[in-house]
Amino acid sequence: MSIQKRLVGSYVAVICVTVLILEIFLIVYVRYYYLHNVERSLMNQAELSASFYEQYFAEADLEEQSERLLKGFAHNSDAQVQIISSSGRLLQDSIGIHQGDPSMTKYVDVRAALQGHAGTWRGKDPATQEPILAVSFPLRSHDVIVGEVRFVTSLTDTINTVKHIAVVLISVGLLVIAIVTVLGLLLSWTITRSIKDLKLAADRMTEGDFSTRVHKRYEDELGSLADTLNMMASRITKSEQLKNDFISSVSHELRTPLTSIKGWIITLKTSGHDNKALLHEGLDIMESEGDRLNHMLEELLDFSKLDNGRIVIHPAPVQVVQLLHHIGKQLAPRAARQGIALEIQAADNLPVLQADENRLKQVFINLIDNSLKFSESSGRILVQASTAPDQQHIIITVEDTGIGIAEEDLQYVLQKFYKADQHATGSGLGLSIANQIIGLHQGELRITSEAGKGTTVHIHLPVKNLTIS
Ligand SMILES: Nc1ncnc2c1ncn2[C@@H]1O[C@H](COP(=O)(O)OP(=O)(O)O)[C@@H](O)[C@H]1O
Ligand SMILES: [Mg+2]
């Protein structure tokens, strides 16, 4: 069942029950009120007539005076008046029929009055089948019941009035139900409309169209759901964009070394046989391009592992000084080739770190690689390691005199795929990976740089208490 049907259904059900209860109560009450009024007025007349009799006719014989009495009683009343003897015989009747009928005791009101209290009876007129109300009141002479006076009136008008009022009440009730139903439909429409919008947009997103946006109609829960959905779509669009950028940048990165390798293969195929020097040069370049490819693929693999939280640190004692010197030796040929001075300055008494040596090595190589990549020849790279004043950390800085990073780029360089210069080689992942690895060691990586002057990367690593979760 649709939400609209459920909403409207429950509204209408509640209002129907309420209206029904109210109607029953009102109609019963109106009926009671009208009938009671008629009965009270008859009773008043009967009581008045009886006291009149007691005051002025108590001495006289009821049967003899009955005609005069009837005239007096009926004078002020629209009702039918009867005078009945103490034996229950009808003595007088203002409309004249049934005169002499002895069987008045069949009516409860008559019997009640003969026993000394006021009686009422509602039923059908035996002759006309009209609904009637009868009220009897005893006539006393010196505390002896000598007969009774009976007032009878037709209830047709009263019942018609009550029916009339009931019709009006029921009509009003139906009108209320109709209005509530329409209002309920309108209200639920405003809700289901928003839901339909959301559903439509979600469907389109399921089909892959993330440019779609939900129109937010109201500032309510559904409105904020629309906001959330829209935000989700724009996030997905953004990450889709990032993915596409990444793929194109990676394919570009892969193509450059491959093109170079292929070019050398063709060169060597045609003239490599007789030119030993050329052969050597070609193979060297192919080797280093192969290394570059390998490096890039490793970076990508690492990145995807880091992103999934699948990189685990295996801590072991690490001699930072030795590690740095080792890396320095490894990169020295390249620095020399580029005409850049690479210098390692490390205090001898550095504490032993608990860390993953291979991952730390990866970080430093990355940083020095950046410095080499972004420095002109005759530049200088200085790697320093020292103990922090608190004795709890080792501080390692990699400082270069390269092109530096512009202030607006500085805040982004730690992000994945971010490169200040889109055309520079590299995937833009190196710093992001380095930062995450240092983070896994509970350390901190910070970059300061000035465009044109150079860049310094500061790394703080805690000496002890490396807990790996
Ligand atoms: N030492 C540096 N000097 C100047 N710019 C740097 C340096 N290190 C990093 N950058 C900038 O930060 C970007 C991101 O570096 P990184 O994450 O290592 O990616 P990649 O080296 O693949 O470009 C670089 O593209 C470059 O713009
Ligand atoms: Mg790099």
Image (tube, rainbow, N blue to C red):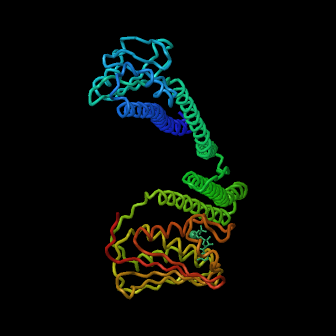
- In which image quadrant can residue 337 be found? bottom right
Q: From the viewer's perspective, is residue 332 above or below residue 2?
A: below
Q: Where 119 falls versus 30 (above or below)? A: above
Q: Is residue 291 above or below residue 216?
A: below
Q: Write down the quadrant of residue 170 in the picture.
A: top right
Can the viewer see residue 206?
no
Q: Residue at x 36, y 18 (%)?
A: 107
Q: Is residue 336 left or right of residue 76?
A: right
Viewer-proximal residue among 189 and 99 = 99
The answer to which of 191 and 288 lies nearer the viewer is: 191
Q: Left or right: where does residue 353 sit relative to residue 411?
A: left
- Please state which of residues 9 and 115 is positioned toward the viewer in this rendering: 115
- Please give the name of the residue rendered at 60% of the width and 76% of the height, measured from the top-left corner: 410
Total of numbered circles in the picture? 0
Q: Residue at x 63, y 78 (%)?
A: 405
Q: Using residue 259 as the reference point, say whether residue 29 is left or right of it.
A: left
Spot occupied by residue 311 in the image (x, y as percentages of width and height): 43, 60
Quarter of the render that holds ligand 1: bottom right
- Quadrant in which the C terminus is drawn: bottom left
The picture places residue 422, in percent across and down from the top left corner, at 68, 67
Q: Position of residue 67 (x, y in %)?
A: 44, 20
Q: Looking at the picture, does residue 48 appear above or below residue 392? A: above
Query: How far across and down, in percent of the image, does residue 360 sit?
Result: 44, 71
Residue 437 in view: yes
Residue 387 lies in what quarter of the image? Answer: bottom left
Q: Which of 359 and 177 lies nearest the eye of the viewer?
A: 177
